[in-house]
Amino acid sequence: MPTRRIGPLQSAGALAFLALLASLPARAAGISAQARLAAERVAVSTCANCHGWRGHSVAPKFPVLAGQHSGYLLAQLHAFKAQTRGDPDAIGYMWGMAAALDDSQMVALSDYYSRQPPVAGPRGDPHLTRRGRAIYLHGDAAEGIPPCAVCHGPTAAGNTTYPRLAGQHVQYLMKQLRSFKDNLRDVAIMHGVARGLRVADMRAVSVYLQSLGS
């Protein structure tokens, strides 16, 4: 697999992201009761139209936010506002939605959704689920696909750097994998993973991930 060179702007972006993650505990602890209430109002009155009540999206086009890590959510909101996340739905929906949010509102919203309990999605075809589990846990050496679990964890719960994938909609996961493959989302590590995945493998991994619980 060819090595992708990281330019100065990407390096600066990575350093800024790490600094953002490092500051999260203090920032979350500093969220006032008023800010938490305001974030919940925004979530219920606006965000719920697409992402569902308390982040439990029922529309497969829109991601489940409940239980997602606050650091990941905050990074995505910053990317939406800066218009650096370039997949079609980010452009069509979230660039505009994030434009009006200030930093404190983004911190409070990210914290709000991270506190909501996640749930498992519906189970799919058992054959696809088995295939998806094998790829997720062990990768596919013949196709140059590394195990997803190395970054996202054995139960796909994610961590402060990598997002939670368990319980996410199949349609949304496949859409993001295609965006990584086509570099619409410019994330080098995910481009390297996704470009080796066939559509059938993307579906298998997505079906497996949707079925996982908390």
Image: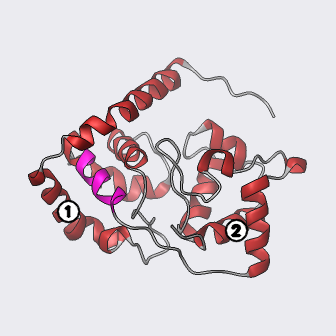
Determine the main secondary structure of the stretch shown in magenta. helix
Give the residue drawn at x 35%, y 70%.
50
Q: Secondary structure at mark 2?
A: helix
Q: Closer to the camera: disc 1 or disc 2?
A: 1
- Confirm or deny contact between disc 1 and disc 2 (CB under 8 A): no
Does the segment drawn in magenta span residue 205? no
The residue at the far right in this view is 142
Q: Residue at x 48, y 46 (%)?
A: 86
Q: Give percent across and percent down for residue 197.
A: 76, 55
Residue range (magenta): 106-115
In-front residue for pair 187/208 = 208
Q: Which amino acid type is shown beneath numbered disc 2?
A: Arg
Q: Position of residue 83 (x, y in %)?
A: 38, 42
Q: In which quarter of the view is residue 4 placed? A: top right
Q: Which mark is residue 144?
A: none
Work out whether 39 lies above or below 144. below
Tally of numbered discs: 2
Q: Residues within 10 Å of mark 2 (few under 14, many from 20)?
A: many
Tell whether 98 sits left or right of 88: left
In this rendering, the answer to whether 72 lies above or below 130 is above
Three-letter amino acid code of the residue under disc 1? Glu
Side of 141 where 175 appears, left or right: left
Q: Which residue is mark 2?
A: 203
Whether 109 is among the magenta residues is: yes
What residue is drawn where x is 18% and y is 40%? Answer: 30
- Would you place residue 202 above or below residue 23 in this image? below
Residue at 39% x, 58% y is 92
Q: Identify residue for label 1.
A: 40
Quarter holding the N terminus is top right
- Can residue 75 be seen in this snapshot? yes
